[in-house]
Image: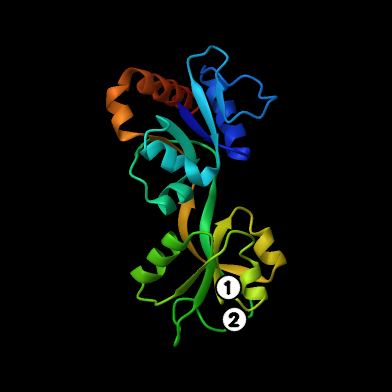
Amino acid sequence: MIALPKGRLADQTLQLFAAAGLSLPAANKDRKLILASSRGDIRYVMSKPADVPTYVEYGAADLGICGLDTLRESRRHVYEPLLLPFGYCRLCLAAPVNRPDTPLRYASQPRVATKYPNLTADFFRARGVNAEIIALNGSVELGPLVGLADLIVDLVETGSTLQANGLVETRTIMQIQAVLIANRAAYHLKRTAVESVIGRLRSHLAQGQ
């Protein structure tokens, strides 16, 4: 069983799987959430991206694909056998362009809006900054615009959304890309099947280098 994140990451994953010779799920006209591959040798779980590490850690899926941001934020205990060559972006701290002070030196507690409360808290704690973390699920760029937050932490690909909302990157917290993750028990108990998938992907990626 392989957990796939719905959306663009799933499309890129399936393109990679096809190129590596893995069988893909059949057409999903009924919008099923568990799909058998065309050869019947793999089952795919279509999941929200944030849930993939949970499915894999608890053994509901043997393997999964997610972004490093999702994995680190979730703090799930899984193996990470392979980084994948897509899903590139960065997790950044951003501030209003007209803010006069640097974002890591405050006389008072800064408020930071983010979809990544764990990673954000870790970042500020490591620098001795007592930040108030405000968890949001939508467009965190709104935080400074409506006076909810002083700063934001969010994924950045081109920076155009930040620029359009009067924000500028001030720190890169981590570089992001897609990663293949594996359930720890399945990696040993189902080693032949799991290594078959990993091996095909690794071999294909090595050929492209």
Q: Nearer the viewer, residue 50 or 86?
A: 50
Give the residue at mark 1: 95
Please indicate whether residue 162 sits to the left or right of residue 57 in the image.
right
- Marks counted in the figure total 2
At label 2, the amino acid type is: Arg
Q: Let me know if residue 178 appears in the view.
A: no
* Label 2 crowd bin: few (<14), some (14–19), many (20+), radius 10 Å: few
Residue located at (52% from left, 54% from top): 90
* x and y, in percent, of residue 63 in the image: 42, 31
Question: Which quadrant of the structure image shows residue 60?
Answer: top left
Tag 2 secondary structure:
loop
Tag 1 secondary structure:
strand
Task: State which quarter of the image contains the N terminus.
Answer: top left
Please report contact status of discs 2 and 1: CB closer than 8 Å, yes or no: yes
Residue located at (59% from left, 81% from top): 99
Residue located at (43% from left, 47% from top): 71
Placement of 169 over or under 190, stated as above or below: below
Residue located at (42% from left, 51% from top): 74
Please identify the residue farthest to the top as the structure is shown: 39
Q: Nearer the viewer, residue 153 or 174?
A: 153
Q: Nearer the viewer, residue 69 or 25?
A: 25
Placement of 196 over or under 209, stated as above or below: above
Give the residue at mark 2: 99
Q: Let me know if residue 37 appears in the view.
A: yes
* Label 1 crowd bin: few (<14), some (14–19), many (20+), radius 10 Å: many
The colour scheme applied to this rendered structure is: rainbow
At label 1, the amino acid type is: Ala
* x and y, in percent, of residue 196 in the image: 39, 19
* x and y, in percent, of residue 130 in the image: 40, 77
* x and y, in percent, of residue 20 in the image: 51, 20
